Amino acid sequence: MTDVASNTPKSRTSSKRSMEFTFYFSIIFVLAIPFATVFWVLDVVRKQTLMLHGPLARAWAEADRVTPLIFSA
């Protein structure tokens, strides 16, 4: 016998929440770009290589880490 309760379809979150998440993500991303650029330049000078994640990748990772913290509260 199949357990129907465990296979129920999940409802989508409201588009208002995803728009809010996108809004906060974009603000944090834009604010993180200058700081990520400075730290990227420091890493390039210190390690003397360009084989590092660039400033946009660093800013994206930081925004991706911080934004869920806002929504977890």
Image: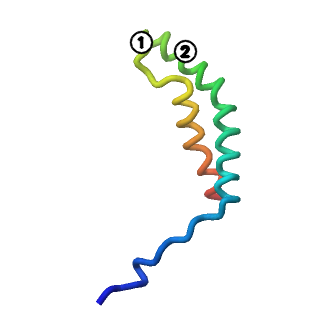
Label 1 residue SS: loop
The amino acid type, in three-letter code, at marker 1 is: Thr
Residue 60 vertical position relative to residue 18 in the rendered view, above or below: above
Q: Which residue is mark 2?
A: 41
Residue 10 vertical position relative to residue 49 in the rendered view, above or below: below
x and y percent of residue 28 in the render? 67, 38
x and y percent of residue 34 in the render? 66, 23
Residue 33 vertical position relative to residue 28 in the rendered view, above or below: above
Residue 28 vertical position relative to residue 69 in the rendered view, above or below: above
Q: Which residue is mark 1?
A: 49
Label 2 residue SS: helix
Q: Quadrant of the C terminus?
A: bottom right
Between 30 and 8, the one lying in front of the other is 8
The quarter of the picture where residue 6 lies is bottom left
Q: Quadrant of the N terminus?
A: bottom left
x and y percent of residue 21 in the render? 65, 51
- In this picture, residue 17 sits left or right of residue 1: right
Between 12 and 66, the one lying in front of the other is 12
* Picture residue at 70% right of the left edge, 52% below the top: 20
